[in-house]
Amino acid sequence: MPVIDSAEFAVSRAQLSGRIAVSELPRLAEVVLDGTTELDWELQGGVDKLERPWLYLSVNGKVQLACQRCLQAMDFKLDCETVLTLFADEATLDEAEQADDDLEGLVIDPALDVLALVEEEVLLALPFAPRHDRCGESDVVVVSDKPNPFAVLAQLKTRKAE
């Protein structure tokens, strides 16, 4: 379980990456149906033009969620990218977030658990109520020997017109 000093990591423009099984992320494992799937993650550090350190986190993979309509398994493709700007304290972070609605921030942590950060970002990326686009559809076409009742009505209608 990698732990980093977030400010030092960002300023030194360091990089980390890895693969983790969903079962190793306890809060995420409670939400998904299959804990054996794995997620790929990458963390990079840097400094923006305002001299603020930032962390770029990318997580990719596929998880199985329960459709809230039919309760069947559905695949959800994760492809999340986040840039977290680091701030010295909560007050400075709040002020920056109020000034910029698109800013996502984090207080500098000398012992940041990278996998906890990965788990948090994945949980934020999941839909609140996952649903299939169309539930219960199958590729099986049912063929019936019975005539379509509307076709029979159409034939009666055309006979009357003759």
Image (cartoon, rainbow, N blue to C red):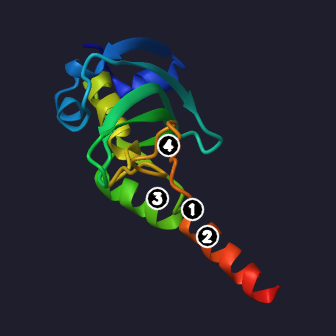
Amino acid on which disc 2 is placed: Val
For the residues bearing labels 1 and 2, Cβ distance under 8 angstroms: yes
In the rendered image, the quadrant that contains the N terminus is: top left
Amino acid on which disc 1 is placed: Asn
87 over 156 or under it: above or below: above
Secondary structure at badge 4 equals loop
Residues 31 and 91: in front is: 31
Q: Which residue is mark 2?
A: 152
122 over 22 or under it: above or below: below
Secondary structure at badge 3 equals helix
Indicate which disc residue 96 carries. 3
Amino acid on which disc 3 is placed: Ala
Comparing labels 3 and 2, the label whose residue is closer to the camera: 2
Q: Earlier in the sequence, mark 1 or mark 3?
A: 3
Per the model, the C-alpha gap separating discs 1 and 4 is 13 Å
Q: Is residue 74 left or right of residue 21?
A: right
Per the model, the C-alpha gap separating discs 3 and 2 is 70 Å
Residues 90 and 16: in front is: 16
Q: Which residue is mark 4?
A: 142
Q: Which residue is mark 1?
A: 148
Comparing labels 1 and 4, the label whose residue is closer to the camera: 1
Q: Earlier in the sequence, mark 3 or mark 2?
A: 3
In the rendered image, the quadrant that contains the C terminus is: bottom right
Secondary structure at badge 2 equals helix
> What residue occupies the far bottom of the structure in this picture?
161
Q: Position of residue 75 (x, y in %)?
A: 41, 33
Measuring 33% from the left and 23% from the top, which residue is drawn there? 5
